[in-house]
């Protein structure tokens, strides 16, 4: 297995990125969490318990599907889909929440809090809390609650309390602020179950580690099917967890290209997209919510509002490891507009019988473009991070508003 | 000894209570901020904390969040905040500490911030989300411009962290009274007193206590063991309530003076 150079330093830095930019109150809990995670990481019993849950509760391994008709449609490279959409709760988020809930239990925490954007992480958190009988509070932006009403109800059915956040842009960023405020107030008994490879150390590295199961499986599956590694990996990048989970086990394979797809939204101006690496669109290094990374911001360092048709990509910053992979050039980043994602959403449904999450549809849209530029000897492997049930209403509204 | 430590030892000598008001720059507007700084300086403040508004104030409760939102609607940057400080500096000698999240400072440029802040007569900088581990370069830059780096300690801080913070802090140490965000509380926690005692094992700097202090009795109780009490949200709530009133500035001065206990002997 390619064990990669991309490990952060002891305080979670990849070069200038990452680290811990938090109020002092959170330092002791972060140090406690880091120590607990370091211990769990080398504990065979922890690994075995997690592996059993991933298999028997979440539904791993997920299949790797050859997308025959999409490949024909693109007239180029062969397209494979890593089917994280088939996991319990409908997205890759459960890989991370299962890992972290086991950690919370080891740490003796009885109360779990989380933020959610699309609601997928909130549902995954509510699910594992139900599984283990823990109290669960999920913070969600009021705008996202509107966009993802079905997921709000799902969380409630699972016994979680969903708290609406009515500040700022009322999306993921504001939900994270509120979760951090809760954590800082209730540090003693509360576990903050962060949902992406974001935030202060150790979250970016821990969430990544829990998501690398995607890349490890995909690697073994493609080698078995095709007898070789893929030429290009494609994944959508919100906070960056499904993408880093796919990419990381391949980072040492120089011949494997990797493309992260950000939300291009409806335009290039600040506020109209969530493409943090779009430097003419306001993305540049900065500090937000505990970590240094690329941040969409105005000239005064105020964090910009963002827009994406997909709530899960609608965030002003990006996980710090991606910032480092961007600067080193190891991973390419591009963006796909709302309209292109919508088209890919419909195309995948019609051609492959799979309704993808709008987030994942961004990756599919780019994969189609890319495949068309490549030859049939080449392989493009796309992470289908989630299923689109939650997005059916949004897509319907959006299609109807156009006709 | 910098201007901040001098101010503490001066008021200590004179038996004056240590009192640190906090206001958000640009709330209700920048011109009023300057007048408020002057008024607070003339009302017995030992040090004044001038908050730099930020779009994502994750360590703040609703009162200061709203103040930041109001201020940001004016659409100004750090230079305008420093201009307020400079205008006040011409009229009062009270030390001024910039209180900010890191990103606005980082985007302004740390070197430029330090030189411009020093030129504006600012005495120190406190960055809510900057711990000493991440502040190595920031600390050196402040130091080269004779600015104090005020650091926070919290009830959750381990002894090892208190020691680390003590070696990097200057001016005074800001002890957070309880785990939580800014905002008034009915009852002050006993954690604060214990924390201040622990800090003093590692640092000889003055120790101020803040977060949750909103009443004169709480200020007085805090001063029995700490060198100063910080009042933020309670003051900002008064500014919110009186915004637009012609007598806002003198009323805030009156409110501030009402919080300062007469003749309380500090430690
Ligand atoms: C299905 C799906 N894919 C992708 C994302 C984006 O997150 P990340 O970049 O952490 O994978 C989300 C977030 O909610 C999601 O629900």
Image (cartoon, coloured by chain):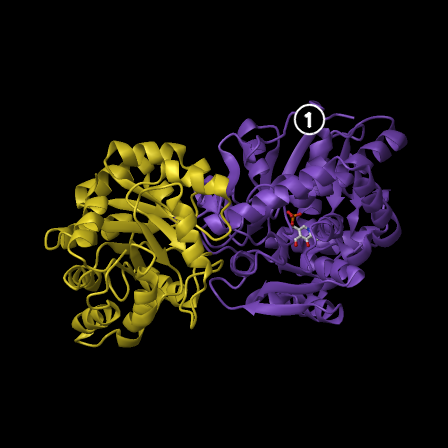
Specify whether A110 is left or right of A302. right
Which one is nearer the viewer's eye here, A312 or A162?
A: A162
Quadrant of the image for the N terminus of chain A? top right
Which one is nearer the viewer's eye here, A32 or B36?
A: A32
Specify whether A106 is left or right of A278. right
Furthest residue toward left? B91
Height in image: A142 above or below A299? below
Q: Position of residue A195 (x, y in %)?
A: 65, 51
Which one is nearer the viewer's eye here, A241 or B229?
A: B229
Residue in the picture at 62% in, 54% down: A192
Q: Is residue A278 at least partly visible in the picture? A: no
Q: Choose top left, top right, bottom left or bottom right for residue B105.
A: top left
Callout 1: SS? loop
Q: How many marks?
A: 1
Classed neighbour count for the residue bearing mark 1: other residues with Cα under 10 Å, few (<14), some (14–19), many (≥20): few
| Colour in which chain B is drawn | yellow
- Chain letter for the part of the structure drawn in purple: A
Q: Position of residue A315 (x, y in %)?
A: 55, 52
Quadrant of the image for the C terminus of chain A? bottom right
Furthest residue toward top? A254
Q: Kindly identify which chain the residue marked by label 1 belongs to.
A: A
Height in image: A75 above or below B178? above
Specify whether A396 is left or right of A16. right
Q: Which residue is mark 1?
A: A4
Q: Choose top left, top right, bottom left or bottom right for residue A90.
A: bottom right
Which one is nearer the viewer's eye here, B165 or B99?
A: B165
Q: Choose top left, top right, bottom left or bottom right for residue A242.
A: top right
Q: Is residue A279 at least partly visible in the picture? A: yes
Q: Position of residue B136 (x, y in %)?
A: 40, 33
Height in image: A44 above or below B184? above
Residue in the picture at 14% in, 62% down: B42
Specify whether A318 is left or right of A393. left
């Amino acid at each position: 297995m390619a064990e990669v150079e991309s490990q952060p330093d002891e305080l979670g830095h990849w070069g200038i990125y990452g680290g811990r930019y938090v109020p002092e109150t959170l330092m002791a809990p972060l140090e406690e969490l880091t120590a607990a995670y370091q211990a769990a990481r080398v504990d065979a019993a922890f690994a075995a318990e997690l592996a059993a849950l991933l298999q028997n509760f979440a539904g791993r391994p997920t299949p790797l599907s050859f997308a025959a008709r999409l490949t024909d449609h693109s007239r180029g490279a062969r397209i494979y889909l890593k089917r994280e959409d088939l996991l319990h709760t409908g997205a890759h988020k459960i890989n991370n929440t299962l890992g972290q809930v086991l950690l919370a239990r080891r740490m003796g925490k009885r109360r779990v809090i989380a933020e959610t954007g699309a609601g997928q992480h909130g549902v995954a958190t509510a699910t594992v809390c139900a599984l283990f009988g823990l109290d669960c509070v999920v913070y969600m932006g009021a705008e996202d609650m509107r966009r993802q009403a079905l997921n709000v109800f799902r969380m409630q059915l699972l016994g979680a309390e969903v708290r609406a956040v009515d500040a700022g842009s009322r999306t993921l960023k504001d939900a994270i602020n509120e979760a951090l405020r809760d954590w800082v107030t209730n540090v003693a008994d509360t576990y903050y179950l962060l949902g992406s490879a974001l935030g202060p150390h150790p979250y970016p590295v821990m969430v990544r580690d829990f998501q690398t199961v995607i890349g490890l499986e995909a690697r073994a599956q493609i080698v078995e099917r095709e007898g070789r590694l893929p030429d290009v990996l494609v994944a959508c990048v919100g906070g960056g967890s499904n993408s880093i989970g796919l990419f990381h086990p391949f980072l040492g394979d120089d011949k494997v290209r990797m493309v992260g797809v950000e939300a291009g939204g409806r335009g290039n101006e600040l506020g109209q997209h969530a493409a943090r690496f779009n430097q003419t669109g306001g993305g540049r290094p900065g500090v937000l919510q505990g970590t240094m990374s690329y941040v969409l911001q105005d000239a005064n360092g105020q964090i910009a509002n963002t827009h994406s048709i997909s709530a899960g990509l609608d965030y002003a910053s990006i996980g710090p490891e991606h910032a480092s992979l961007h600067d080193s050039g190891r991973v390419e980043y591009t963006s796909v507009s709302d309209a292109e994602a919508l088209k890919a959403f419909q195309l995948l449904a019609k051609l492959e019988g799979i309704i993808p999450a709008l987030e994942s549809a961004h990756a599919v849209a780019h994969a189609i473009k890319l495949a068309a530029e490549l030859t049939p000897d080449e392989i493009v492997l796309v992470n289908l991070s989630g299923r689109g049930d939650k997005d059916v209403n949004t897509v319907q509204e959006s299609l109807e508003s156009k006709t | 000894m910098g201007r901040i430590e001098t101010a503490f030892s001066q008021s200590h000598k004179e038996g004056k209570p240590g009192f640190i008001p906090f206001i958000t720059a640009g709330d209700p507007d920048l011109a009023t901020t300057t007048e408020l700084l002057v008024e607070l300086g003339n009302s017995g403040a030992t040090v004044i904390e001038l908050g730099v508004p930020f779009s994502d104030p994750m360590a703040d409760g609703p009162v200061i969040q709203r103040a930041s939102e109001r201020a940001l609607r004016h659409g100004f940057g750090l230079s305008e905040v420093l201009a307020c400080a400079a205008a006040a500096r011409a009229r009062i000698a009270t030390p001024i500490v910039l209180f900010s999240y890191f990103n606005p400072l980082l985007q302004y440029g740390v070197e430029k911030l330090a030189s411009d802040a020093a030129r504006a007569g600012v005495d120190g900088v406190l960055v809510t989300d900057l711990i000493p581990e991440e502040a190595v370069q920031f600390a050196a830059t402040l130091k080269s411009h004779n600015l104090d780096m005020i650091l926070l300690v919290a009830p959750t801080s381990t002894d090892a962290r208190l020691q680390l913070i003590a070696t990097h802090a200057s001016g005074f140490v800001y002890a957070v009274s309880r785990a939580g965000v800014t905002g008034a509380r009915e009852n002050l926690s006993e954690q604060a007193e214990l924390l201040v005692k622990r800090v003093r094992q590692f640092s000889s700097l003055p120790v101020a206590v803040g977060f949750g202090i909103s009443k004169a009795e709480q200020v007085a109780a805090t001063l029995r063991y700490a060198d100063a009490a910080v009042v933020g949200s309670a003051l900002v709530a008064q500014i919110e309530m009186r915004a637009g009133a012609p007598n806002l500035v003198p009323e805030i001065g009156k409110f501030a003076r009402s919080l300062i206990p007469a003749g309380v002997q500090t430690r």
